[in-house]
Image (spheres, grey):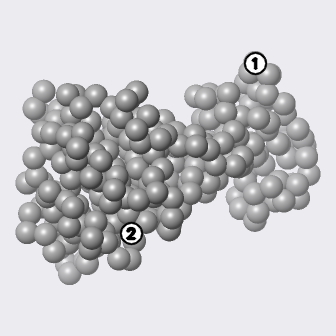
Amino acid sequence: MESSDFYIFGKHPVEDTLTRTPKKINKIFIRTKSNTSFIKNIERLSSENRIPVIHVPGRKLKDLVGNVNDQGIVAQISPVTYFDLDDWLITHCKIDEQPAVLLLDEIEDPHNVGAILRTAAASGIDAVIVPKHRQAPVNATVYKTSAGTAGLVPIIRVTNLNQTIMRLKEEGFWFCGLDQNAPKSFWEQDYDMPTAVIIGSEGKGIREKTLSHCDFIINIPMDNTVESLNASVSAALVCYEIKRKRSIEQ
């Protein structure tokens, strides 16, 4: 299933996509009179990959992506492909290798989603699962925040998160939910199993019904009366704790 075409902007996201996955790019728009070494490199890479480059006035870039810091370069990229859950389970999931996945429970801040996708790619997470409703889509802001890593890890979009949890449990996954009232810290948790971690929304956390499906509920210890961290920081801590513990066990 695919979203509509969208634009990414800024030097690093465009260059990274052009280097990693040039087939995703349909065309590149560059602000007129830009003639830096960076732009020359972009034009060279585009020519090698037969990607059209169009020089346009700065106001055209604003029309495409709005009043953002586009750094004089915008790329139109092909739709982000969302995986179907059953297809992913058949083609990508190897349960005996103890995969780890993230489930995002209605995270509506695109910057948080982008940062989570970047962490997932860097820490070796096998998939990120997102609901269709009340969830930030993978748009240009998400892509830029992810620094071009969105799509390196399969993104699975589902209609019902609770039904998805039950489906993954049937396949052998164990679920961890982050909740500040949990008696057990994420340091104490064992991840030596097919693991799914649920990351709650910025304000409400994990919904009560979803939390009830978790096999383990864990917290991130806080000092100085700090109530919580944002969703992307919480996800990063848990992702790298999973990676750390699994590297020790190998």
Label 2 to label 1, Cα distance in Å?
A: 42 Å
Drawn side of residue 106 relative to residue 68, left or right: left
Quarter of the view holding residue 217: bottom left
- Position of the C terminus, as image quadrant, is top left
N-terminal of the two: label 2 or label 1? Answer: 1
Drawn side of residue 220 relative to residue 16, left or right: left
Amino acid type for the residue under numbered disc 1: Glu
The disc label shown at residue 184, or none:
none
Quarter of the view holding residue 92: top left
Q: Which mark's residue is nearer the viewer, 2 or 1?
A: 2
Q: What residue is shown at x 79% (from left), y 22% (from top)?
A: 50
Drawn side of residue 111 relative to residue 123, left or right: right
Q: Is residue 157 visible?
A: yes
Q: Residue under circle 2?
A: 201
Q: Is residue 37 visible?
A: no
Amino acid type for the residue under numbered disc 2: Ser
Nearer-the-camera pick, 124 or 166: 166
Q: Is residue 122 above or below residue 211?
A: above
Q: Residues within 10 Å of mark 2 (few under 14, many from 20)?
A: many
Image location (x, y in percent) of residue 243: 23, 39
Image location (x, y in percent) of residue 211: 24, 67
Q: Is residue 49 above or below residue 69?
A: above
Q: What residue is shown at x 64% (from left), y 53% (from top)?
A: 140
Q: Residue under circle 1?
A: 48
Image location (x, y in percent) of residue 110: 53, 61
Q: What residue is shown at x 82% (from left), y 59% (from top)?
A: 62
Nearer-the-camera pick, 110 or 227: 110
